Amino acid sequence: MENERSSLITIGGEQYEMVLTTRATKAISTRYGGLDNLGDKLMKSENMEMALDEIVWLITLLCNQGIQIHNLKSEDKKPLLTEETVELLTSPGELAEYKDAITEAMMKGTKRNIVSEDNSKNAVTAE
């Protein structure tokens, strides 16, 4: 996978790519009502347990996108992460650090490449 679409994190000594795919975007929209509401939900979680649950869910979702893309393209299949596995292999301090990687994956996944056509009045023409 190109690193331009993903951010890397290490869970339990293994490196995972977090990728915001169309499938992940749909899942986030279903859970939060859209990507725009995600940040608000994470920041305004009523309690620590709820905030941790949301971050674990998001890490699991985004890492599993990278795993599923790998499995689609490779004969060497990797098992998907579960929320329970992420909870067991991480500490609350690490989850706070992963927020930056989540943000990076989201930014990379939502960036738009704008291509402009050069048909302006100022374009150089051959005479």
Image (cartoon, helix red, strand yellow):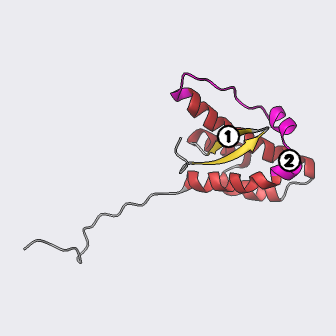
Q: How many marks?
A: 2
Residue 88 in the magenta stretch? The answer is: yes
At a point 24% along the width and 68% down the height, the residue shown is: 119
Which residue type carries mark 2?
Leu
Please say if 62 is above or below 47.
above
Q: Looking at the image, is mark 1 or mark 2 earlier in the sequence?
A: 1
Whole-percent x, y for residue 17 in the image: 64, 42
Q: Residues within 10 Å of mark 1 (few under 14, many from 20)?
A: many
Distance of mark 1 from mark 2, alpha carbons? 19 Å
Q: Looking at the image, which is closer to me, 53 or 12? A: 12
Q: Looking at the image, which is closer to me, 37 or 105? A: 105
36 with respect to 89 (left or right): left
86 with respect to 77 (left or right): right
Whole-percent x, y for residue 28 in the image: 68, 45
- Foreground mark, 1 or 2? 1
Quarter of the image where the C terminus is located: bottom left
Whole-percent x, y for residue 13 in the image: 76, 38
Please say if 124 is above or below 19.
below
Which residue type carries mark 1?
Tyr
- Quarter of the image holding residue 72? top right
Q: Looking at the image, which is closer to me, 83 or 35? A: 83
Whole-percent x, y for residue 11 in the image: 77, 40
Q: Secondary structure at mark 2?
A: helix
Q: Residues within 10 Å of mark 2 (few under 14, many from 20)?
A: some
* Residue reaching furthest to the top: 75
At a point 63% along the width and 51% down the height, the residue shown is: 105
Q: Which residue is mark 1?
A: 16
Q: Which residue is mark 2?
A: 52
Which span is picked out in magenta?
Answer: 72-95
Residue 57 in the magenta stretch? The answer is: no
